Image: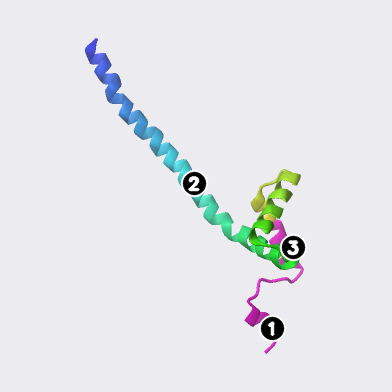
């Protein structure tokens, strides 16, 4: 019987390593998704800041509130806002580009 006990102990680190590998894969997928969605959320925040004259935190809070109210992801709300701004001809511009020379 001692051999069986030793075998169980030897399998445990492999199982822990497999669990840790899966956890890290999930974390990497989350980071990858964040890197893909962050720019669109930042653009939407910029639109809200310009439109409502609010702080970045208040702009993000507005996105979160809309997300909760409509039961849709924040990035979906942000993408819709950015797409609407593009259709309306509102582009993100630096002050130098938007001011006539």
The reply, left or right, for residue 25 in relation to residue 46 is left
Mark 3 sits on what residue?
Answer: 84
* Rendered location of residue 76, percent (x, y): 67, 52
Q: Mark 3 packing: few (<14 Cα in 10 Å), some, or many (20+)?
A: few
Residue density around tag 1, few if under 14, some if 14–19, many if 20 or more, within 10 Å: few
Magenta stretch holds residue 88: yes
The quadrant of the rendering that contains the C terminus is: bottom right
Tell me the SS state at disc 3.
Answer: helix
Q: In x, y percent, where is residue 9? A: 28, 22
> Picture coordinates of residue 65 (x, y %)?
72, 49
Identify the element where label 1 is drawn: loop
The residue at the point 27 percent across, 24 percent down is 10
Vertically, is 78 above or below 2? below
Q: List the single residue furthest toward the bottom.
A: 101
Outermost residue, left side: 3
Any magenta on residue 94? Answer: yes
Q: Is residue 89 left or right of residue 30?
A: right
Mark 3 vs mark 1, foreground winner is 1
- Distance, label 2 to label 3, CA atoms, is 29 Å
Read off the magenta span.
79-101
User: In which image quadrant can residue 94 be found?
Assistant: bottom right
In which quadrant of the rendered view does residue 21 lie?
Answer: top left
């Amino acid at each position: 019987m001692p051999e069986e006990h030793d075998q169980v102990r030897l399998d445990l680190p492999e199982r822990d390593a497999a669990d840790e590998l899966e956890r890290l894969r999930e974390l990497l997928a989350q980071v990858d998704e964040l890197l893909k969605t962050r720019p669109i959320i930042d653009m939407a925040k910029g639109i809200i800041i310009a439109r409502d004259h609010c702080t970045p935190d208040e702009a993000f809070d507005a996105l979160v509130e809309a997300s909760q109210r409509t039961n849709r992801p924040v990035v979906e709300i942000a993408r819709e806002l950015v797409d609407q701004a593009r259709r309306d001809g509102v582009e993100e511009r630096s002050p130098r580009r938007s001011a006539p020379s």
